[in-house]
Amino acid sequence: SQQRLGNAQRATRSQMEGITSSVVATVAAVVSFAAAWRVFQTTLGKSVQIDSIPKTFFAIQGSMGGAAIEMSYVRGEAQRLGLDFFALAESFKGFSAATKFANFDLSTTKDMFSSVAESASVLGLSGDKTKLVLMALEQMVSKGVVSMEELRRQLGDSLPGAFELGAKAMNMG
C-alpha cells in the first residue's frame, strides 16, 4: 500500500513537473509572440511614417527634388542636434507648410526651425516638448497672429524663457 502510494506520489510529481514545464513554455511563447508583435507593429508604423514623410514634403515643395532636399535637411538637423528624425520630420512638415502658405521663403523657414530645434536640444527638451514648441510656432504662423495663449501656454510652458523673449521682441518687456 505504501509502495503504491509512493508510486502515485512520484507519478503525480512527474505530471506536475510536466504541467509546470508546459505552463512555463506556454508563457514564454506568449511573451515571445507579444514581443515579436510589438516589433512588427513598430516596424510597420515606422514603415508607414517613412513612406508618408517624402509624400508630404513632395506635396509642400511640389517636386521630388524639393522633397529630397527637405528630407536631407531634416536628417542633417536630427543628426547634428541628436534629435529623433521622425519627430523632427513630423514637426518640420507642419511648420514648413504653414510658413510656405504665409509666404515665408524657405531660407527663413529653415533658419527659424533650426534655431528652435537647436534651443530644444541645448535645453534637453523631450521630443514631446520640442514638438509642442514647434506646433505653437506653426499655429502662430498659420494664424498670422502671436496670441498670448500660444506664447504663454504652449511656447512658454515648453521652452523656458520664450515668453520673456517674445515680450521683449514685441517691445512689451
Image (cartoon, helix red, strand yellow):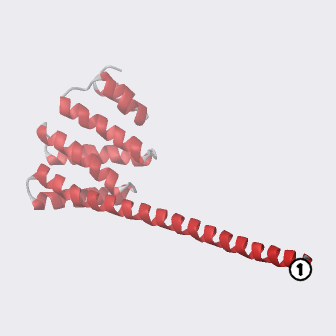
Please tell me which residue lies in front, 171 or 126: 126
172 or 38, which is in the foreground? 38
Residue 52: x percent and y percent?
22, 56
Q: Residue at x 12, y 51 (%)?
A: 59
In this rendered view, identify the residue nearer to me: 6 or 68: 6
Can you say whether 153 is above or below 120 in the image?
above
User: Would you name the residue on which mark 1 appears?
Assistant: 3
Quadrant housing residue 101: top left
Instruction: Point out the residue furthest to the left here.
Output: 62
Q: Position of residue 60 (x, y in %)?
A: 13, 49
Disc tally is 1
Quarter of the figure with residue 6: bottom right
Residue type, label 1: Gln
- Left or right side of 111 for 129: right
Vertical position of residue 156 compared to residue 99: above or below: above
Label 1 neighbour load within 10 Å: few <14, some 14-19, many 20+: few
Q: Is residue 145 left or right of residue 1?
A: left
Q: Residue furthest right?
A: 2
Where in the figure is residue 74, as x and y percent of width and height? 27, 56
Q: Could you tell me which residue is drawn at 35 percent across and 60 percent down? A: 79
Residue 120 falls in which quadrant of the image? top left
Which secondary structure lies at badge 1? helix
Q: What residue is at 36 percent from the left and 21 percent from the top?
A: 173
Residue 122: x percent and y percent? Answer: 43, 47
Rendered position, 68 above or below 1: above
Identify the residue shown where x is 33% and y is 51%.
87
**Image height check: is 94 above or below 85?**
above
> Where, quadrant-wise, is the N terminus in this rendering?
bottom right
Asked if one can make out residue 168 in the rendered structure from this viewpoint, the answer is: no
For residue 152, side relative to residue 93 (left or right): right
